Amino acid sequence: MLREIIWRELLDHLQSLRFALTLVLVIVLMLTGSVLYIHDYRQQVADYSENVSENLRLLEDKAKRGLHSVVSRYLLIYRAPSPLGFIAEGHEKDLPNAFSVDAFELVGPQTILRRNYTLQKFDALDWVFTVGVILSFAAFAMNYDSISGEAEKGTLRLCLSNSLPRATLLFGKYIGTLISLSIPLIMGICLNTLIISLFGVLPFEPTYWLQIGGVVLFSVLYISVFATLGLFISCLTRTSSVSLVLLLLVWVCFAVFIPRTGGLLASRLAELPDEKTVTREANHATHEILNRYGRGRFSARWSPGEPLTRAASIADAKQAIYNKYRHQQLHQVKLAQNISRISPTAIYQIGCEALVGTGIKHYERFFKKAIEYRRSLLQFTYEEYPFNPNLFLKDADRQQLRETQITLAKIPKFDDTPTGFSTTFAEASLDILLLFLFNLVFFTGAFLAFTRYDV
């Protein structure tokens, strides 16, 4: 009996205009997104490779000038472009992608991109947009009349008059709708991935394909939320027109209103100090250490002859304050995400970015690696420093410090490698659990409402 219900529901959807329009729209958006992404990603990779090569040349030139030049003059480090940005771009073009760093300071973040800032910003045509917006709307369009519509036509009474369990009918409609929605999803994803792979943009690495598979399953779970919600609302109403209006209001709240208001609420609940206040705190910490060590005739930055330990203490104190401010910024973003998690659409976007390692997750990882890189440069300075780091140097020692050459191979290099699948899955586990709970709550609500539905 269940098989017949699923098959009938599936045929009804496949023969409908709603399914045809959904299929065409999803395929067009997926194809367009893949073509646009290929050009953008190639440009990002070219820019990143050029910047990294320029940094290596600059670092080699510094090594010839000596240890002091290597560790006390700024070097730009860059965030690597993500090859899975076609799944969840995560506004990566709007996020900072560089830091200026030496052994004593981490300055930034900065945005160094080839882009026209006067152009209006549009969301990327990635999977998150296509699935999160288009297929969620299609889920409502396909089953807004699944119960109330059949009640209006009288077919629901006919079905239940054949001693058909209500739970079986409801579950069959759910499975039929979910299969119908999965067809355009799978077709669009296969075409999108095939084009990107054929153009050599997506590396054939197991980690990437595991992440893609995880996103596909996560997308099905997300679509299921709107399928069960559509059934639930349809079981609560007597006419299909009322169901449609209610579902449209719910869709606007979930897909548009809530995701866009999380940031506004977070900015009020967790206000950030202004940059002048942060700078004053950093300067105050610098003066405290200078007074503790004795100012002498040296500045706050490390100069040849100054005790290395004093410069390192100043650097650590200043960076602790600046890093605290940067962590506050990240905390504000995470608060905004937590607020917006009452929307399945926001959960889907956050979860996809976590699964593929883009967006704010990518920036946070880049920021942590930048902090570690500065520490490695400072540690390298201590290892290569040829004198007592607690003492002032004489003029001859200062000259020796300036002229001491360092081999390029010894200098720590910055590397922004992506994380593995196990890490990204762990980061997305909360969002997976939340979507599962949404499914459970909505389907339970639909079942309870349908058991009391008067036909």
Image (cartoon, rainbow, N blue to C red):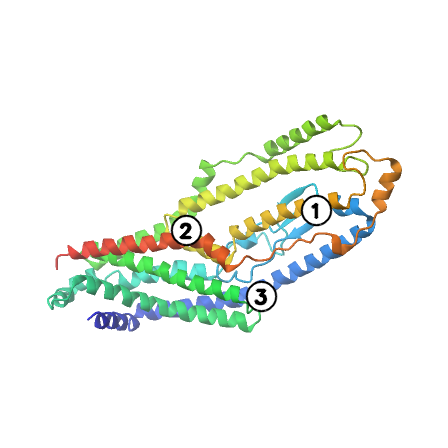
Nearest to N terminus: mark 2 or mark 1:
1
Mark 1, residue position: 377
Of the pair 145 and 206, the residue shown nearer to us: 206
Q: Is residue 197 above or below residue 88?
A: below
Mark 3, residue position: 39
Q: Residues within 10 Å of mark 2 (few under 14, many from 20)?
A: few
Quarter-of-image position of residue 415: bottom right
Quarter-of-image position of residue 56: bottom right
Image point (65%, 48%), residue name: 373
Disc 2/disc 1 C-alpha distance (Å) = 36 Å
Q: Are marks 3 and 1 in contact (CB under 8 Å)?
A: no
Choose mark 3 or mark 1, whichever is in front: 1
Q: Which amino acid is tagged 1?
A: Leu
- Direction from residue 343 to residue 375 in the image, left or right: right
Disc 3/disc 1 C-alpha distance (Å) = 36 Å
Q: Secondary structure at mark 1?
A: helix
Residue 102 visible at all: no
Choose mark 3 or mark 2, whichever is in front: 2
- Quarter in which the N terminus is drawn: bottom left
Image point (75%, 53%), residue name: 410
Q: Which amino acid is tagged 2?
A: Leu
Of the pair 232 and 434, the residue shown nearer to us: 434
- Direction from residue 99 to residue 262 in the image, left or right: left
Q: Are marks 3 and 2 in contact (CB under 8 Å)?
A: no
Image location of residue 253, percent across then percent down: 35, 50
Q: Which amino acid is tagged 3?
A: His
Image location of residue 15, percent across then percent down: 28, 73
Disc 3/disc 2 C-alpha distance (Å) = 34 Å
Q: Residues within 10 Å of mark 1 (few under 14, many from 20)?
A: many
Mark 2, residue position: 430
Residue 230 visible at all: yes
Of the pair 44 and 305, the residue shown nearer to us: 305
